[in-house]
Image: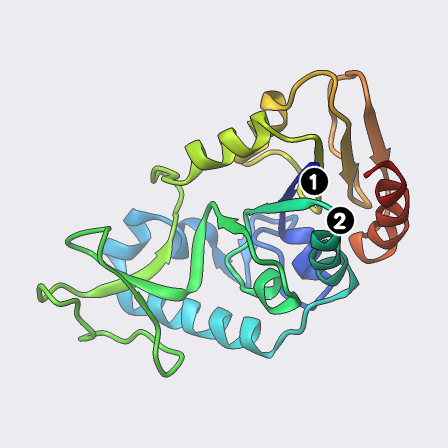
Amino acid sequence: MKKLVVLTGAGISAESGIATFRDANGLWEGHDVMEVASPQGWRKNPALVLDFYNQRRKNAHDAQPNPGHRTLAELEKYFKVTIVTQNVDNLHERAGSSQVIHLHGSLFQSRSTLNENLVYDIEGGEINMGDKCERGSQLRPNIVWFGEMVPLMEDAVREAETADVFMVVGTSLVVYPAAGLMHYVPDNKPIYVIDPHLPRISPRPNLHLIAEKAGIALPRIMEELIKQA
């Protein structure tokens, strides 16, 4: 089986009704992103941060996978598929994708503020002040915030380097290091970029730009890829 690697961003989840991380005025659900997505914001007001992610978690739980998510899961019948996602929801898994790398963490996990390797599945849907890890420190969302390292980036790079086909779906390609992943794809391998608002990309061989939503474009592209599999 050929290997298909897909980098997904906020656009594919937006089609399921999940608010994108940052809108045109730099706010996320009415908050300055640095208040709710940075270590500084956490230190300043951890209760606000916990409440913010509790609400995002509820929204993500209520959302449903869309045709874009389901098409990527369907492609596992024809390709060895790895999803590398910047999204923190679980819509890829709920659609049926079995190999998902969450670069920016998961809404549905908490982690220790003392030891980042102590990670837990969230029970009951919320993290609250006073919820502690086994070593007695406050739990925080297992989300990679601005200014923090992206621990799974090396795994994602290895996937890109060995891709037979690479897709970029629903991302503006402005958030690094994820935006640099496509530069690791071998020059002779095709890259498909799918987004209604296409990012600026330097020309390269085998580059296909599709200015459409994932839910519309992916089912059609799947048919093309199956013929080439």
Question: Residue 136 at what x, y percent from top left?
Answer: 9, 67
| Nearest the eye: 187 or 7 | 187
Q: Secondary structure at mark 2?
A: loop
Q: How is the image coloured?
A: rainbow
Question: Residue 54 at what x, y percent from top left?
Answer: 42, 73
Question: Residue 113 at what x, y percent from top left?
Answer: 20, 56
Measured Cα–Cα span from mark 2 to mark 1: 7 Å
Q: Is residue 181 above or below residue 197?
A: above
| Residue at screen point 54% across, 76% down | 61
Q: What amino acid is labelled 2 in the image?
A: Tyr
Q: Using a 10 Å C-alpha cutoff, classify the residue at mark 2 as few (fewer than 14 neighbours), some (14 to 19) or many (20 or more).
A: some
Q: Is residue 7 above or below residue 176?
A: below
Q: Which quadrant would residue 98 be assigned to in this image?
A: bottom right
On the question of residue 227 being in view, the answer is yes
Q: Badge 2 is on which residue?
A: 78
Q: Which quadrant would residue 20 be assigned to in this image?
A: bottom right
57 sits to left or right of 202: left
On-image quarter of the C terminus: top right
54 sits to left or right of 88: left
125 sits to left or right of 81: left
Question: Residue 192 at what x, y percent from top left?
Answer: 78, 35
Q: Which sits earlier in the primary sequence, circle 2 or circle 1? A: 1
Q: Are marks 2 and 1 in contact (CB under 8 Å)?
A: yes
